[in-house]
Each structure stands twice: as structure tokens, then as C-alpha cells.
Image (cartoon, rainbow, N blue to C red):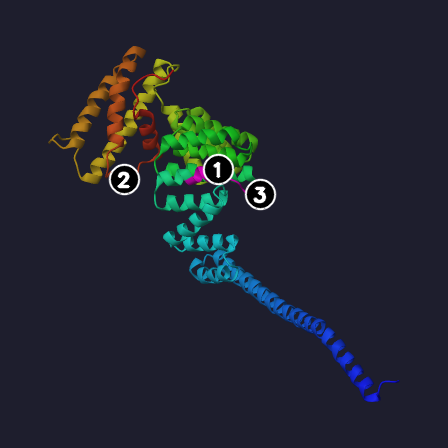
């Protein structure tokens, strides 16, 4: 027999419900997956836009701060660079420049703290070590300054490391000279000369450094090297002239001063040429000159000293023709005594014996104060006779 129609319908309904129940879980899973995907896409978009905004803000404030720092306005640069650091989540480059701005604004403890934190992350970083060296130098802490300068010299640099290390060593040498640590400065300078570039600028810098150390002999060598590398370098020629002059090598000094004057006419150089010429022409200590020339030079020197003494007497209202115990009158009496001896001496051995007492007298006269500015002749006398007394071989 066939099933009744109602039973057949119920069977179909139950089958449909069973199919719906079977599909419900996949539909839910699909719906939830779709929702999750949409939510993730939404949050990713929002997060990306926020990151872009934050990056733009950090870049903007960094550029603003860097521009103010380059313009010499560190106080204005600090808040801008702080904002850049905040938005960048402690970008090391931004932190480094913030520390530089703090240092330039004389906020040394804050700057040092930032640099030390950076150095903990990169102990071999040349730039960070250099900045810490400068802070130590500003505090006159020689030990710490040398430590960090050496860290910079032997540290890592992003570009042109050889040139950067040479520049740092120059800075270290200048610091040591300024701190009057001349022995250490000389050691660093000798290390620098072993690796320095063969350029006029480097040679001139070394020559000036030796001059600051009072080493005119080495200074002269490097001034000469610089002038030979660049024959139109007036500064090198003048430096060589002064170094040779201080060493008593007057003929060489004259040539260097004349060379500088030929390239650049300057009144001070002309005065030095006149002074050196006088020193050469009036120097009685040269062993090779004959007795007549030595006597002539000594007589001229005594005449120049007498003029200086009389200018002193006029300035102090002293009568040199009387003797009342005034120091200028006593000096004039000594001058008269030596002058008579000199006038009566013609042989070379006698003139050589007079060199020391004449040198002592002329030096004392030329060094007297309150007598007006010394003229070139007086400067020449002091240069020749100060510390003199023996023949120059």
C-alpha cells in the first residue's frame, strides 16, 4: 500500500531540517572568518595609517630640529628633537642629534646621559666616542677626554674612516696642547705624522702644532715641506721665516720672509725683513767676520743702546750727565766705561772678550720699561744680544 500523503510530507520536512543543521556550522564558521578578515583588514589599515602619521611627525620634527641646530639655535632645536625621538620610538639617529643639541645648549649632564646610553648599544661607534670626548674636554677632564678620543680614533665610522680618524687625532692634539700636556701632545703628533696625508694643509697644520709645542726645529722642517708642495703658500713661507728667526738662522729667515713678501705685500712682513736684515748686518757674534767689522758692529750697537737710554732718561726726567744714584745714571756710567774700552780695542781677541759685557749692558738697556715703543733697531739689538756672549760657529 502507498504511504499516506501527510507522512510523506513530514518525512521531507525532517530531511530538510537535517540538511539545514548540517550546513549551520560551516555557515557560522564562514561568517565568523569573513568578519575576522574584515576586522583584521580594518585594524591593519588604521594601524598602518597611524604608523605613517607617526613616521611623518617624527621626520617633520627631526628636520625642524636639525635645521635649528645647523643654524646655531640648539635651545630651539631641543624640544623639536625630543618630539622626533618620541614619535620615532627612540630612533638612535634622532637620539644622537638630540644629545648633540643638548651639548651645544650647555646641558652637558643630559647630553652625556644620552651619549652613554647610545655607547652601551654601540661601544665601538666613532661618532659617539668623539662627542663624549668633546664633553670631557669641555669639563677639562683630560683622562676621560683621552679615553674617548682614542675610542673615536680606533672606532668604526660610516664613511671615510681614515680621514675621520686623522681629524680626530688633530682634535686630540689641539686639546692636549691647550691643556698644557705637551709630552702627550708630542707623542700624538708623532703618531699623526706617521700616517698623515702628503698635502700642504696637513704639513702646515703639523708645522703649526710643533710651533705651539715650542719645537721650532721640527716646525721649520714641515713649514719648508709645505712651501715646497705649494710654492705660493704665503702662510708656510711666513711660518718658516719665523721658525728660522727664532732658531737664529737669520739668513734663511730673510729668504723666507722675502719670498712671502713677493707673493703678498704686507707691512708686518716688510718690518720683519728690515729687522732680520738689521740683525744680520749688526751681529758681532759671527766667527767668520774680521776684527774691523766686529768692532764696527759693536760700536754701532753701543750707539743704538745710547739712543735708547737717552729716550728712557727723557721719559723719566733724568739727567744722565750727573750721578745721583738713579739706575739710569748708573747704567750710563757703565755705558761710558765699556764704550771707552771698545774705542781703544782693535785686535780680535780683545773684541771677543768684550762681547759678553757689551751683550749684558745692551740687553739691560733695551729691556727697560717706560721708554716708549722700541724701534726696529732696538728690536734687533735685543734679538742679537739677549743671551749672547759667545761666537757663533
In the rendered image, is residue 285 in sight? yes
The quadrant the N terminus occupies is: bottom right
> Residue at the location (74% across, 80% down)?
17
Q: Nearer the viewer, residue 26 or 392?
A: 26
How many labels, in total? 3
Examine the rendered structure and indicate whether residue 121 appears above or below residue 27: above
Boundaries of the magenta span: 148-160
Mark 3: which secondary structure? loop
Of label 2 and label 1, which has the lower sequence position?
1
Mark 2: which secondary structure? loop
Residue 21, x across and y down, in percent: 72, 76
Residue tagged 2: 372
Examine the rendered structure and indicate whether residue 365 appears above or below residue 31: above
Q: Are marks 1 and 3 in contact (CB under 8 Å)?
A: no
Residue 24, x across and y down, in percent: 71, 75
Front: mark 3 or 2: 3
The quadrant the C terminus occupies is: top left
Question: Tag on residue 153?
Answer: 1
Residue 152 shown in magenta: yes
Front: mark 2 or 1: 1
Mark 1: which secondary structure? helix
Residue tagged 3: 159
Examine the rendered structure and indicate whether residue 232 appears above or below residue 132: above
Please identify the quarter of the rendering in which residue 60 is found. bottom right
Amino acid at each position: 500500500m502507498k504511504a499516506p500523503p501527510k507522512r510523506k510530507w513530514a518525512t521531507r520536512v525532517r530531511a530538510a531540517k537535517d540538511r539545514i543543521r548540517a550546513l549551520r556550522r560551516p555557515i557560522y564558521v564562514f561568517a565568523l572568518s569573513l568578519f575576522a578578515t574584515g576586522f583584521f583588514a580594518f585594524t591593519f589599515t588604521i594601524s598602518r595609517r597611524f604608523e605613517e602619521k607617526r613616521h611623518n611627525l617624527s621626520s617633520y620634527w627631526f628636520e625642524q630640529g636639525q635645521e635649528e641646530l645647523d643654524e646655531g639655535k640648539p635651545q630651539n632645536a631641543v624640544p623639536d628633537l625630543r618630539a622626533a625621538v618620541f614619535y620615532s620610538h627612540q630612533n638612535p639617529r634622532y637620539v644622537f642629534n638630540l644629545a648633540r643639541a643638548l651639548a651645544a645648549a650647555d646641558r652637558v649632564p643630559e647630553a652625556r646621559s644620552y651619549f652613554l646610553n647610545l655607547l652601551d648599544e654601540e661601544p665601538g661607534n666613532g661618532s659617539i666616542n668623539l662627542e663624549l670626548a668633546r664633553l670631557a674636554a669641555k669639563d677639562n677632564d683630560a683622562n676621560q677626554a683621552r679615553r674617548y678620543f682614542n675610542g673615536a680614533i680606533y672606532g668604526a665610522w660610516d664613511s671615510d674612516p681614515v680621514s675621520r680618524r686623522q681629524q680626530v687625532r688633530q682634535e686630540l692634539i689641539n686639546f692636549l696642547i691647550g691643556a698644557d700636556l705637551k709630552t702627550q701632545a708630542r707623542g700624538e703628533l708623532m703618531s699623526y705624522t706617521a700616517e698623515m696625508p702628503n698635502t700642504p694643509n696637513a704639513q702646515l697644520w703639523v708645522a703649526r702644532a710643533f710651533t705651539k709645542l715650542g719645537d721650532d726645529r721640527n716646525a721649520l722642517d714641515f713649514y719648508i715641506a709645505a712651501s715646497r708642495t705649494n710654492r705660493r703658500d704665503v702662510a708656510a713661507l711666513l711660518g718658516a721665516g719665523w721658525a728660522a728667526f727664532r732658531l737664529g738662522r737669520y739668513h734663511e729667515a730673510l729668504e723666507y720672509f722675502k719670498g712671502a713678501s713677493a707673493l703678498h705685500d704686507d707691512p708686518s712682513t716688510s718690518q720683519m725683513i728690515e729687522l732680520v736684515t738689521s740683525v744680520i748686518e749688526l751681529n758681532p757674534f759671527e766667527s767668520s767676520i774680521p776684527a774691523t767689522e766686529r768692532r764696527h758692529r759693536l760700536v754701532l750697537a753701543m750707539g743704538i743702546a745710547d739712543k735708547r737710554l737717552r729716550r728712557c732718561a727723557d721719559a723719566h726726567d733724568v739727567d744722565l750727565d750727573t750721578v745721583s744714584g738713579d739706575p739710569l745714571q748708573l747704567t750710563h756710567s757703565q755705558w761710558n766705561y765699556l764704550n771707552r774700552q771698545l774705542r781703544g780695542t782693535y785686535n780680535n781677541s780683545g773684541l771677543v772678550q768684550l762681547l759678553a759685557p757689551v751683550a749684558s749692558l745692551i740687553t739691560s738697556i733695551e729691556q727697560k720699561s717706560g721708554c716708549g715703543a722700541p724701534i726696529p733697531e732696538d728690536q734687533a739689538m735685543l734679538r742679537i744680544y739677549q743671551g749672547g756672549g759667545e761666537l757663533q760657529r
